[in-house]
Each structure stands twice: as structure tokens, then as C-alpha cells.
Amino acid sequence: MPSLTVPQIPHYTPPPRTKEELHWADLAIIDLAKAQDPDPVVRSELARQVAEASKTQGFFYVVNHGWSAAQVERMFDIADVVFSPAVDAEEKKVYTANIKQTGSYQGYKPRQYWHIDNGVQDQVETYSIHRDVTMRQHPQALRPLLPEIGALARHTHFDVLHPVLRLLALGLELPEDSLVKLHGFEAPGASHLRFMKYHPRSPEDELKTKNVWLKGHTDIGTVTVLYSQPVSALQILGKDGTWRWIKHIENAIVINTGDSMEFLSGGFYQPTIHRVVQPPADQQNHTRLGLFYFALADFEVRLVPFEESPMLKRVGITRRFEDKDAPTQEEWGRARTSAYGKTQLKATSEERKVEEEVIGGVIVRHYS
């Protein structure tokens, strides 16, 4: 009989949420429990809400995702172990990802790997784990925790990602499983968990970067899953050109779509530009611990639109490349991962500080 106990690890206590009045984004809140409703009318209405949120804001919350606040809290405890003294600097080196050469974040990304602006490097440490946690070796401190990490991967993939993909497919008036079929848990692919820790920066670096910790960008994959946490730093760029903050909701998940979903949906689901900035004054001396699941389609999926979609037949398809030139998910993911934070960007707008690079013939923009 399996043990009912779990390894004892230090409890991570997050900082209190900010008391400052910020310009919050008004995001839709999707009750994911309704995605299981047997009434197709209920699911159809939920799909309409998700499609509208994805087209307008590009971000939305999901609640009632099937895990309790205590279960998610435990996963933040585990995420913090990755960056604690339990894994020393020498062991981190052993598990550091060869990002530029492999186009993969699997393992550690050390601090000061990405260039931010004016010679300032990032202060973000990450540890990425493939959804199949047994695919690679991990630091000693994580090994007893792998069953729980694997459970998080499966929960996020099947109980969060798949319902969202079904709703997005319904928004395109496609069969519910059209996008799910492209995201097999056992198929070769790069969907992964990521633990992420942002460290405070010096006043000099804040001045040089105008308080930007990660430039405005769109995500690489199809869907990004972010477990909400209280340190305010994430902002999205609205269609009116205004940056708005993402607010913390207890035990909610923040969802956004990425480039690959844009390609597959023929531009119907546009990814939203988002960035990370210095937290408000009452949170500036704290680290910011993040828990993500970055979903990408299976490696062999070619990123071409679903031309059979009745919705796309009515509204039209917007392509970023010709279908014959479309990359596979593996090609697009590796190319963007290799380039991010390491290439020389070309400024195109001093007013908004927009910079560009070209990856696989596609213009990729970054915003300060």
C-alpha cells in the first residue's frame, strides 16, 4: 500500500499581497468545473466566454480547477526547494541547461543569462522539468519529491490544459478534441513545468532598465498556465497601449495563449504582450516565486491554421507565413528558446521602445 506521508520540507511563506492601488486588468474568471457539465449549452456558453477573453484581453483566470489551495501551497513549498541551499552551486552547475545550443530550458537557467537592457542582465533563476519527470535526472533534494511534481504535471495537463483546449476548439467551432489531439502527454514534445524565482535588483539596474525585469513579449507555445501568487509584477499591454497589472486571486490560475496558438487558429486567438516589472514599493524587498506549465503542441505538429474551422471560414485567416513554410512545433520552440535574451535586437520605435528580431522568417517583437 503506498505511503500516505510526503517528504518533510520547509514551508514557503509568500509575502503579503500589495496594499497599493494599481491599474489592474479586468480579466474574465472562468469556472472550469462547468467544462465538465453534460449540458452542451453550458459548455457552449463557457467556450464563448473563453473565446471572447482570448480575443480581447488574451489573459483570463480559471477557478475550480480541481486542486485545493493546500495542494497548490505544497507545490510552492516544493518549488522553493529548487532554489534553496538544499541544492548548492556546484550541484546546480551539473543540472544547468544548455539553452542556446539545444533550444531547451530543461534544468536550471542561472541568473544573469538573459540581457534585459543597457547592459543589465536578468536576476531570474528557473528550473524547468519535462512533463515526464523521469525523462532526466534531477538534483538530489528533488528526487523524493518527483511523485508530487509528476502529479502536478498530470493535473495541469489533463485537468487544466485539456479543458481549456476543448473550450478554445469550440470557440473555433471545431470538434472539442481537435486541439487536445495535438497535445499528447506521452507524445514527443516540450510541454514542461517551470519553477521560477525573481530576485530583487539594485537601484542602479532598475534605473537602467526603467524598472523592467522581463521585456514585453508573447509566449512561444499554445497555452501558458500560471498558478496565481501574491507578488504583483506581471503586466499586460492593452489594445489602448496601456500596461495593466495582473491581480492575485487565491487558488486561481492565470491562462494566456501564445504564438503557436495564434498560428494554429489562423490569428483568431492573438497572444497578448506581457512583461514583468519591479513590484510595488511594499513588495520590493521580496523574491517572487512562480509556478508555471508551458504547453506546446507535439513536436511533429506543423503550425498551420485549421482551415476547416467554420469560424475561420467566416472571419478569415491571418497568416504569419505561408503554409508551405510553416515550422513544426519543435522547430519554432527551439528557435525561439535559443534566441530569447541572447540576440541583438533592432529598435523600431523609440517612443514605445519596441525592438525586433526575425526568427524563422517571422518578426518577433519585444516591448519595454
Image (tube, rainbow, N blue to C red):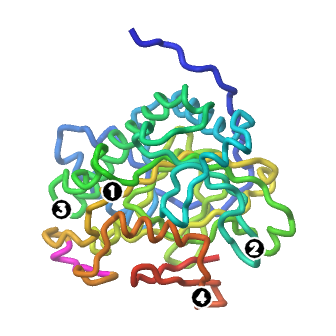
Q: Is residue 181 left or right of residue 161?
A: left
Residue 248 visible in this rendered orientation of the protein? no
Residue lying at 59% horizontally and 88% vertically, measured from the top left: 346
Q: Amino acid at mark 4?
A: Lys
Q: Is residue 51 left or right of residue 315?
A: right
Q: Could you tell me which secondary element the residue under label 1 belongs to?
A: helix
Question: Can you identify the residue that label 3 sits on?
Answer: 173
Question: Can you identify the residue that label 1 sits on?
Answer: 49
**Residue 241 numbered tag:** none
Residue lying at 71% horizontally and 76% vertically, measured from the top left: 117
Q: CA distance from mark 2 to mark 3?
A: 43 Å
Q: Tags 2 and 3 in contact by the CB under 8 Å rule? A: no
Q: Earlier in the sequence, mark 2 or mark 3?
A: 3
* Residue 133 locus on image (x, y percent): 44, 38
Q: Amino acid at mark 1?
A: Gln
| Numbered disc in front, either 1 or 4 | 4
Q: CA distance from mark 3 to mark 4?
A: 39 Å
| Numbered disc in front, either 3 or 4 | 4
Residue 64 visible in this rendered orientation of the protein? yes
Highlighted range, magenta:
312-319
Q: CA distance from mark 2 to mark 4?
A: 17 Å
Q: Earlier in the sequence, mark 1 or mark 4?
A: 1
Q: Residues within 10 Å of mark 3 (few under 14, many from 20)?
A: some
Q: Could you tell me which secondary element the residue under label 2 belongs to?
A: helix
Along the line of sight, the residue nearer the viewer: 240 or 226: 226
Q: Could you tell me which secondary element the residue under label 3 belongs to?
A: loop
**Residue 209 numbered tag:** 2
Quarter holding the N terminus is top left
Question: Can you identify the residue that label 4 sits on?
Answer: 346
